Image (spheres, helix red, strand yellow):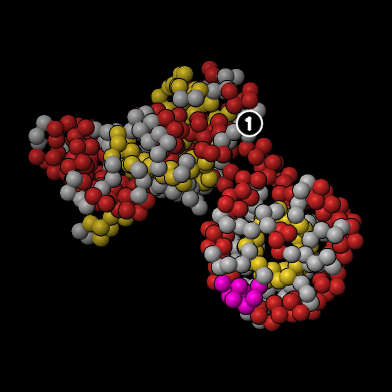
Amino acid sequence: MAVEIEDLRGRVIVSCQPVRDGPLDRADFVAGLALAALEGGAGGLRIESLRDVRAVRAATGAPIVGLVKRPLPSSPVFITPEIADAEALARAGADVLAFDATLRARPVPVSELISAVHALGRLAMADIATYDDARAAVGAGADMVGTTLSGYAGGPTPETPDLDLVSRCAGLGAPVLAEGRYHTPEQARLAIEAGAFAVVVGSAITRPEHITAWFAAATQKARPTQQASQPVLAVDIGGTKTLVALVAGEKILESRRLVTEKARGPGAWLDAAAAAAQGWRGRFGTAAVAATGAVNGGRWSSLNPSVLAIPREFPLVEELSRRLGVSVVAINDAQAAAWGEFRFGAGKDRDMVFLTISAGIGGGIVLGGRLITGRDGLGGHFGQMLIAVEDGYQRLEDTSSAGAIERMAAARGHAVTGSAIVGAAAAGEAWAHDVVAASADRLTVALSSIQMAIDPDCIVIGGGLGLAPLYLDCLRRRLASVDARMRPELRSAALGANAGLLGVADLARSQVFASQQLTWEERP
């Protein structure tokens, strides 16, 4: 009996397409997968290749959506590209013939292919990638459209189904089969609610290789409970000081403060950190280091050698792991502090930017629960932004950091520390006020630009200079005159000098350093 479109309404169609040349790529195995899917309640089957369509048709009378995949040298279209392919599928026993209906260079016009399918007494399913593809296919007489090629016809492939495309295509009048990256029952339900006539599910049911890979990736991100419950040895290496601490959750159990002796170099800094942790051996299962500069793939380099000179691509993770005898993770110190403030501090669970203003200027970005580290680990390095000055451009940290105001003060004959300069400004000394104002003016421009570029819920300000009440008040006064859309909500960092320690320890426990994309939802 001929298949009617209504036979598929509200049903799951299972795509039984094994990995090419994989262990299940045999006709009898495909037929077995098809029968198992039908026993589970599938309303139809999507089968690729003449061989497999014949085998499945011999095993069942259930509706079959048939297709062939045949690459052509002259066209990107490869799903049932020609009329001869459709004719062969009809002879093999397919009830519905699926074909690529994208608006790309093709060997046969869509309208001719649909006419040929109808002449064979079969239903025509147009596999589309865009709404325009769908509209053209429906106009040419397609019986149904499938969102099969959404995300696969150019550009990056998303991780989730294109529910928006399903909803838009549902308004065209022809049944829409939601297909492409439907991995969970919840996603299938959402597709029906978005207007899908039926849902096609493939890899999540019939490709054990893919399903196993999903589980393997998830378990590899987790740590054994015993190790996860142990404190983390956290090390925060900055331009003037190094902090070493035992961290459990959001608590620092013990800590030690060391001077970062700039002239001695990274090997000596790590030696000092390892020596400081010697008495804690056996109490921590892993270590984490937050370091000023660029950290990517476990290697460390300077961004501004005047803050801390580091040989390019110094093997930070490898060297500290060798000294401590445990696994080590590493990230930029300001990014670690941003994560700490997001998890436990002033930006808790908010889209936020963190800016630390001390000897240099660093920062971090957390959006949608994700720490944005960027392609080369440089996400949030706002201190390296170029700011226009009278004679050209300078890095923001060279114009607005504590180091910058110390240099400006020295040029006026006052060789004092940044905290002394802020104190002098608070006492009404004009030279100090002018130096602090020059720093704040340039930082205000940067803050407004960050707000417009990222639009976070808040910008958290930390660092020795940034947290000075006079400096924060100065920033707020200047921002008051800025257009409200460009004016960020400033918050004082709540964790102080411990933000980097708490942040990097939390990241180490979560074990979500894969590809440096750190996501709260992915925590075990």
140 is within the stretch colored magenta: yes
Q: Does 18 sit left or right of 344 as displayed?
A: right
- Where the N terminus falls, by quadrant? bottom right
User: In x, y percent, where is residue 189?
Assistant: 61, 48
Query: What segment is highlighted magenta in the picture?
Result: 135-142
Residue 81 rendering spot, x and y as whole percentages: 72, 75
Q: Quadrant of the C terminus?
A: top right
What residue is at 71 percent from the left and 71 percent from the top?
124
Q: Where is residue 440? Give x, y as percent.
A: 21, 44
Residue 484 among magenta residues:
no
Chief secondary structure of the magenta portion: helix
Rendering coords of residue 405 (x, y %): 22, 42
Determine the image quadrant of residue 77.
bottom right
Number of callouts: 1
Whether residue 284 appears in this view of the structure is yes
Q: Which of 490/330 is in front?
A: 490
Name which residue lies at 76% across and 79% down: 119
The disc labelled 1 sits on which kind of residue?
Arg
Q: Secondary structure at mark 1?
A: loop
Asked if one can make out residue 201 in the rendered structure from this viewpoint, the answer is no
**Residue 447 shown left or right of residue 49 in the figure:** left
> Could you say which is closer to the camera, residue 160 or residue 274?
160
The residue singled out by tag 1 in the image is 223
On screen, 379 above or below 94? above
